[in-house]
Amino acid sequence: MAKSIKNRISINAVENVVKEYDNEVHFNWYDIDVVVNRILPLNEVRAFIDDVVNACFDNETGRYLPEVKEYAIRVNTLSKYANFAMPANDEKQYDFVYKTDAYRRVVQEVDPAQYGSIIEAIEAKIDYLCDTNAKRLEMQFEDLLSSVVEIQDKLNNVFGGVSADDIGKLVGAIGDGVINEEAIVKAVLNKQK
């Protein structure tokens, strides 16, 4: 039988330890004071994961874009962990992310356990969405195939006894403009009996 712990640590003691934790790291980067949060709060972690995952899928087609993932991770690392304002222009943002050492410097300061968990969560969410999309497409294809088979069955029921000659005569009559709807309906009904 498990022994109960007699000397529990109080919530107040834990909160005091958390308050003393210095989450900010400052460093000078090209005469700029960069502030890095070692650990992100939960709402920022969720936003980071969602931003990256959303960037990895085309808004119109839902297609997965694996080439965007690393870039989106870097952008979110710089904008969420550090005090960098990212350029609105995509080309300038891309240049900042890949043509400077800012990302490398920031990653050196973040908590590796949290950062690793964020990367794992991104991978898991992308895998889940890709699997879900594949299953959805498979179900849609099966529904389409079922509809085609159903239409084929209905056409066979209606035109099953109609020969190629009958269709040729019908097309010829339509082409000549001599169409008698009543005769067509009677012919179809007679074939179904």
Image (cartoon, rainbow, N blue to C red):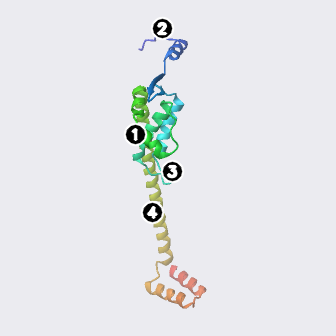
Could you tell which of marks 4 and 3 lies nearer the N-terminus? 3
Residue under label 4: 145
Inspect this view and state whether residue 73 appears.
no
Count residues near mark 3 (Cα–Cα under 10 Å), then give few for <14, some for 14-19, many for 20+. few
Count residues near mark 1 (Cα–Cα under 10 Å), then give few for <14, some for 14-19, many for 20+. few
Q: Position of residue 166 (x, y in %)?
A: 47, 86
Q: CA distance from mark 4 to mark 1?
A: 50 Å
Q: Quadrant of residue 11?
A: top right
Mark nearest the camera among 4 and 3 is 3
Which quadrant of the rendered structure holds the N terminus? Answer: top left
The residue located at (51%, 86%) in the rendering is: 170
Please state which of residues 112 and 105 is positioned toward the viewer in this rendering: 105
Task: Identify residue type, mark 2.
Answer: Asn
Could you tell which of marks 4 and 1 lies nearer the N-terminus? 1
Task: Identify residue type, mark 4.
Answer: Leu
Q: CA distance from mark 2 to mark 1?
A: 54 Å
Q: Position of residue 38 (x, y in %)?
A: 46, 25
Q: CA distance from mark 2 to mark 3?
A: 54 Å
**Is 166 drawn above or below residue 45 in the view shown?**
below
Mark nearest the camera among 2 and 1 is 1
Task: Identify residue type, mark 1.
Answer: Lys
Q: CA distance from mark 1 to mark 3?
A: 28 Å
Residue under label 2: 7
**Is 102 drawn above or below residue 2 in the view shown?**
below
Q: What is the residue that sits farthest to the top in this orientation?
A: 7
Question: In the rendering, which numbered label is found on residue 99?
Answer: 1
The residue located at (49%, 88%) in the rendering is: 169
Disc 2 and disc 4 in contact, CB within 8 angstroms = no
Count residues near mark 4 (Cα–Cα under 10 Å), then give few for <14, some for 14-19, many for 20+. few
Q: CA distance from mark 4 to mark 3?
A: 27 Å
Task: Identify residue type, mark 3.
Answer: Asn
